[in-house]
Image: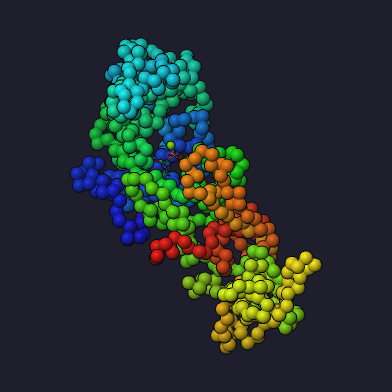
Amino acid sequence: MSTNPTIASNFIQNIIEEDFRNQKYGNKVHTRFPPEPNGYLHIGHAKSICLNFGLARQYSGICNLRFDDTNPVKEDVEYVESIQEDVKWLGFDWEDRMYYASDYFGKLYELALELIKNGHAYVCDLTAQEMREYRGTLTEPGKESPYRSRSVEENLDLFKRMRAGEFPDGARVLRAKIDMSSPNLNMRDPVLYRISHAEHHRTGDEWCIYPMYDYAHPISDALENITHSICTLEFEDHRPLYDWVLEACKFEVPRPQQIEFARLNLNNTVMSKRKLRLLVEGGHVRGWDDPRMPTISGLRRRGYTPEAIRDFCDRIGIAKSNSTVDIAMLEHCIREDLNARANRAMVVIKPLKIVIENYPENQTEDLIAENNPEKPEMGNRTIPFSREIYIEQDDFMENPPKKFFRLAPGQEVRLKHAYIIKCEDIIKDESGNFIELRCSYDPETKSGGANSGRKVKGTLHWVSAKHAISAEVRLYDYLLLEDNEQESDDFIDALNKNSLETIDNAMAEPSLVDAKLGNRYQFLRQGYFCVDNDTEPGKPVFNRVVGLRDSWAKTQKG
Ligand code: ATP
Ligand code: MG
């Protein structure tokens, strides 16, 4: 998958290659991506997707998509659908291997009956509160449940009645019988099944007991012949339980092995489905695909490409200890991708009118502009020039400081692809606001012409007033301004109030009238933009993907 030869092989590749040498699974690599359908995928999931599907691709193996749908209360088909769309969009293919943990509910139940018969599981009536008390702590061993010594017959009877719906939620659980004094809390008779009279999005009301993740996950892996079951570091302490379940359920060797890696954290970014859901449900964003969201659908709408996201996932690599990646690196990846492939265009976001007094009243010239200076093969387009144009309000100052190389009274600038102009006069309203500027142009300085070599310090983007089309432009900033806010739970109070700025009357060069969903541009001097879904015929809406200043590339050089 990685197209970047400088990326060192990661420790998981080392494990796989060691397994090849020992012929542990023959030469097989079979991974899976196991999302819980309780929200939309985010950029952290993209890391896991690229890793799992990427390893399969690299070693000529296969990767399954498996919905880990064992918690009916929070799950929904809307999420199942969005997850499929996002994985495909990222460029990966599970072929005919899309599974659900709920496909295995029958098998999981039978295996639980076997565990009971073999003395490896028991029905426990302790309340949740009592279970916590019996569990002990990191420094104290736990106490055995008084129900631990129930007979196999009694356990079988109670478990079957749990399944038949005889007991209310929380009345009883099925627990593994392992070791209440284990130093690993996960091994102190963990819960395998709980009662929940909840409607499941696939199995309806067929089940009123649901398996726990730690029980369902290893078995799902084994049933699918997974070789390398890759998960994030917080499951490291669960690995002995993963192995115990497969052993106790008598799966044949070689069994799948769990391997943990560090999850992706990004500064200025909320990265947990639970918190993302709070943003959506609280109306703090427009939805899961709001361009400010770190969801894959949000990044897509923002204008990110799958190539840039995959490149980012390659570059951050795979590690065994948690760290936080600078979001500037993600932005660097999209900039690099779009620099190479986006057409250039001129859009004036906050317009200030200029009348070029010595330019003929009814004249229009079609000027030639290259679509992408990095790629001559992307061709040229024409841009109309006329007597009245718009420039950016910020590109003019009446009393400029030194080194202001833009427009000021008596000062000259070049208009990109056009002429050098000079500011002759300012027209103001009664309160002193600028209404328009009066300028002159030097006809000898046409870009590409004989005298175009005459140099002035500044070059501005502009549009012809009578040809320009009106566009809506949306500028984004981070939802979180402080890096540490992602940790706190009151992050809602700390949300950046100015994360979205909408300008509904930007002026765009006329070629953008045809801008279609999926098109991406570099607006000169403003950044990279994409066409938003809200676009209507004749009135494009553009999202700023990212500005032009690359703070990440800078820190790499310095
Ligand atoms: P969250 O904590 O954001 O709610 P999750 O871990 O509950 O995410 P799952 O749907 O269970 O979400 O995750 C599916 C897979 O994606 C898991 O294998 C999980 O380890 C991986 N994953 C989730 N978040 C990240 C992340 N930030 N970085 C890397 N992998 C992740
Ligand atoms: Mg999870």
Above or below for 98 versus 384: above
Instruction: For the C terminus, give its image quadrant.
Output: bottom left
Location of residue 514 by image quarter:
bottom right
Give coordinates of residue 544: x percent, y percent.
57, 58
Give coordinates of residue 160: x percent, y percent.
40, 16
Q: Seen in the image, is 257 located left or right of residue 71?
A: left
Residue furthest right in the image: 430
Ligand 2 position by quadrant: top left
Q: Nearer the viewer, residue 239 or 371?
A: 239
Q: Nearer the viewer, residue 394 or 201?
A: 394
Q: Seen in the image, is 311 located left or right of residue 225?
A: right
Q: Nearer the viewer, residue 495 or 163?
A: 495
Above or below for 355 versus 80: below
- The colour scheme used here is rainbow
Q: Is residue 41 visible?
A: no
Location of residue 472 by image quarter:
bottom right
Q: Seen in the image, is 315 located left or right of residue 384?
A: left
